[in-house]
Image (cartoon, rainbow, N blue to C red):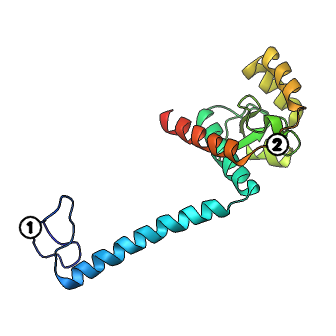
Amino acid sequence: MRCKNCKEKFEPIRFLQKYCLEPECVKVWVDKEKEKQWKAKKTQLKKELMSLQDWLKLAQMTFNKWIRHRDKGLNCISCDKQIKGVTHASHYFSSGGHSNVRFHEDNVHSSCYKCNVELSGNLLNYQIGIQKRIGSDKLILLHEQAHITKKWTIDELKMLITYYKEKIKTQ
């Protein structure tokens, strides 16, 4: 095996040993390990300093990524045209005003930039599209759930993030 630092051949003493035991190589090895440990500690400290709003943003990004993944290849929910460019995760009931259905899979569908941004969701056509995709019964249930106020906790958001990251991996 060759040393990762000096590139000289050596016989490893331990399994997965990547550096020889020359003093300068051991110093590089120790420095790399210290850096790796610091990065892990820094990541943990950042997580501990995150506010509810930070977790909400991260959960929304993860959920939206899954929606894009789920709806890949589908046309825009509002105009029914093929999506060119960036795909948006468009909420039928806005995420800001309807917290209970912010992460509801029936409430969010892929949309084109024009419908989601320029036409503010193109809601009349969105309603036609969503009814075709999920059906009238689910749409009525969605309307009922949309007007219930929900206060998300950090633990709930962490569970959502984990859940949708796993769904992205397995789909």
Q: Nearer the viewer, residue 24 or 1?
A: 24
Query: In terms of sequence position, does the residue under pointer 2 or pointer 1 come before the other?
Result: 1
Residue type, label 1:
Glu
User: Would you say 27 lies left or right of 94 here?
Assistant: left
Picture layout, residue 91 above or below residue 85: above
Query: Residue placed at 85% from the left, 36% from the top?
Result: 93
How many numbered tags mark residues here? 2
The picture quadrant where one finds residue 71 is top right
User: Whole-Å distance between the Cαs marked 2 and 1?
Assistant: 59 Å
Query: Residue placed at 66% from the left, 42% from the top?
Result: 63
Q: Position of residue 155 (x, y in %)?
A: 67, 45
Picture layout, residue 167 above or below residue 130: below
> Dot 2: what SS?
loop
> Dot 1: what SS?
loop
Picture layout, residue 161 above or below residue 124: below
The residue beneath circle 2 is 151
Query: Residue placed at 74% from the left, 21% from the top?
Result: 134
